[in-house]
Image: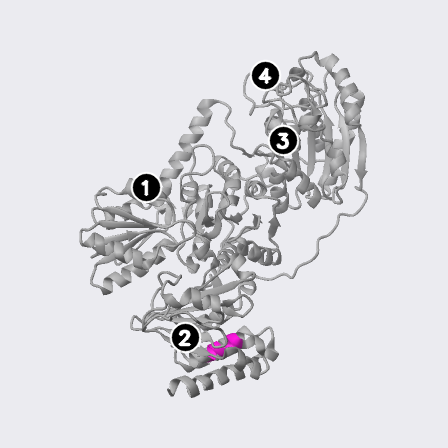
Amino acid sequence: MRKFVRGNEAVMIGAVYAGVDAYFGYPITPASEIAHAASEYLPCLGKEFLQAECETGSANMMYGAASAGKKVMSASSGPGMSLMQEGISYMAGAQLPGVIVDIMRAGPGLGNIWPEQGDYNQAVKGGGHGNYKNIVLAPASVQEMCDLTILAFDLSFKYRNPAIILADAVLGQMMESIVIPKKVSDAPPSEWAVKGDAETKNNLICSIYMDVDGQEKHNVLLNKKYEEMEDDARAESYLTDDADLIFTGYGTSARIARSAVDILREKGIKAGLFRPITLFPFPSKELNACASGKKIIVTEMSNGQYRDDVVLHLENKEQVMSVSRMGGNLPKVSALVEAAEKMMEGRA
Amino acid sequence: MIKRSTGLYEEFTRKGGTAMRATHYCAGCGHGIILKLIGEAMADLDMHDDAVFVGPVGCATFCYYYVDCGHISAPHGRASAVATGVSRVLPDKPVIAYQGDGDLGAIGFNNAFQAANRGDNFALFFVNNALYAMTGGQMAPTTLAGQVTTTTPYGRDIVKTGYPLKVCEVFETLEAPVYIERVSVADTKRIMQAKKAIKKALKIQKEKKGFAFVEILSPCPNNMRTDPVKEAERFTEIMERTYPLGNFRDRSGEAAPVPEKVPIRTEKELTAGGREGIATKNDPSFKERKFKFSGFGGQGILSLGLVVAEAAVSDGKYVSWMPSYGPEQRGGSASCSVIVGGKEIGSPTIDDPDVLVAMNQPSLERFASSVKEGGVILFESSIKADIALPAGVKAVPFPASSIANENGVPKAGNTAFLGAMAGMGLLPFKEKDVTDALAESLSARPLLVEPNMKVFEAAKKWISDNVCRK
């Protein structure tokens, strides 16, 4: 079945088919429609929706419900994401699964409610205190807002680690037609959880290791897990096989770059697009396979946060330039086309 | 002989070290007594297998060394929020949270207060020793007036740092809590009363009757730099002047409130409303068309875009719809962008529309210059447009509001524009899909369908009479 829905609603459609048990959240533009849909859907399914007193509260409610082995989620934007970082760090430390959707808005501080991608480092590099990583997925369509929410739950349970859907206000607010999933996912195994029964009463959910060696051992274990996540790196390439110039961007930036690729192809310039779907694990192999040594234009709605990772992962990074916008402005297709033409002519 | 307490682990292996039966608590500290009372009450009530214990930060972090049940260790101040989360997904299991006075009274006060106000279903034990113990004896919200701590070296000045926080008295103002009592573990007589209150709170939790709160005054001779025995006496005398013991509320005899029922639905029912049998068709020959709809909020701009989008979806096209949102939606101007394509759509936002519909002057002024060469601007003819329209663009002043008024639905200006676009051949898909989408958009107000159809036809006719024949 097809349905024409808003990106934020698609997140909750994905979540109910992923078998989400509980949603804890606090309203914030431009993410609130996710809470609206959650409050409409979950009680009817016998699941839990609770509007928390603050995002610190929602993150810790997630921590509690995830400790019981349940599928939990929340959604927010900039300032709310900052408040959730304490809880997310604890979830990572205690190895708890959970999905957090960040519908990015402009910042820092209060900023505004228009689309930006300035939370890249916060999501991809950890965000809270301590040595940890989040699984980070970057949808670029309303269909992916649904599908990657399901994948986020799967990966989050597979690795017992928080997963973040890093989307932005464009993806949250826009509508597209999606295929509704057919089947509700099963409950994953959670023998590690505290479920209030005789089987799990000796389990302990915590992130405290009072002796330094114990803490380090735990850190090493977590890092090993982050390395294993590389198997789940995902990316999409568009017309890259014969391309002389590769755009790379994620989410809305990738959509804009795709339009630029089409226009350049019509003009006879062989342009392509590399779009990471997982930002952590970063699709390093995939990036190098299609872009290393080529002319590369990085496009993003932030101050080079994504470019820094592209440069970090690229083996041959001689020809990399950047087109970015901030503050709620989007890169213009025409600006990308112009930059590509200049680069191809050797003017940039 | 000291009776071996029930409800605690036989050996405290999580603590480590050699003294497997000794707690890590200092002499004279109340925590060991309180945990023993909780463990014993849990044993009496046969709760050990079912209970989930949420521990705090501070000296009581290590509740999981001792109490024989499932444990979750919460961040500083968040035990109430964590317990809320657990109790919501394990509604039949007893949930216990344990917090100190800095933890609950300061950093986590709102989480505890809001949980109490919601009547969240857990027992909350609040240990008040009038200071931060583990971090080194700093001032807590509960620190007494004049009390010397490591951050009030001259004594707590209530003018600068506020009054001792009386949590039972604050919670007593809330409707939802079932049970509120303040007890002490400073001496044997008081311990016996504390035991009763703790057991009562756990029984309420076993019966899942709601939020039960027990504040426990607990001496901390180590941080008060006093002898445990002397401290107990002094503590009782000075603490109980500010924090009188006693029961504040006991509604445990009443039945637990039952939440309102909501209709039960399946995932499929909840996400229904879509359409079967529609596939998106790849058609590279179809030239992407970009529409910008704009006007005042309340003129139906967003729904006009949606009708066009839904019609295009029915026709198997790739479609994106992007609204203005937030404050723009609530007064002032509204706009939306619709892109219809024969392949996956790139940017869902539009820099250069093929078609601009402007229902008010500010929108016309804002967007007219962006319209692509060869594009079309349809604008409400009653607005004054004294702007230079871009060259190579066809601009059509269109009397949408008069057509809507003439047909008795003044609010259907948006439908008139839909008819005008259809009349001008700007909607590159089947007209039936357009009228079906229009009817569907009015499904909540069926009486409006027919007059809107009339507006649609009248608009088409106006275009045919006034534009296409020219």
Mark 3 and mark 1: span between their CA atoms?
Answer: 40 Å
Residue B417 shown in magenta: yes
User: Is residue A332 found left or right of B200 in the rendered image?
Assistant: left
- Ranked by sequence position, the earlier of labels 3 and 4 is 4
Q: Is residue A3 visible?
A: no
Amino acid type, mark 4: Ala
Which is closer to the viewer, label 3 or label 4? 3
Amino acid type, mark 2: Asp
The numbered mark 2 sits on a residue in which chain?
B
Residue B315 numbered mark, or none: 2
Foreground: B467 or B143? Answer: B467
Residue B103 numbered mark, or none: 3
**Does A182 sit above or below residue A83?**
below
- Ranked by sequence position, the earlier of labels 2 and 4 is 4
What residue is shown at x 57% (from left), y 42% (from top)?
A68
What residue is shown at x 43% (from left), y 80% (from top)?
B422
Q: Position of residue B283 (x, y in %)?
A: 32, 72
What residue is shown at x 48% (from left), y 35% (from top)?
A93
Assign the N terminus of chain B to one quadrant of the image.
top right
Q: Which residues are magenta?
A: B413-419
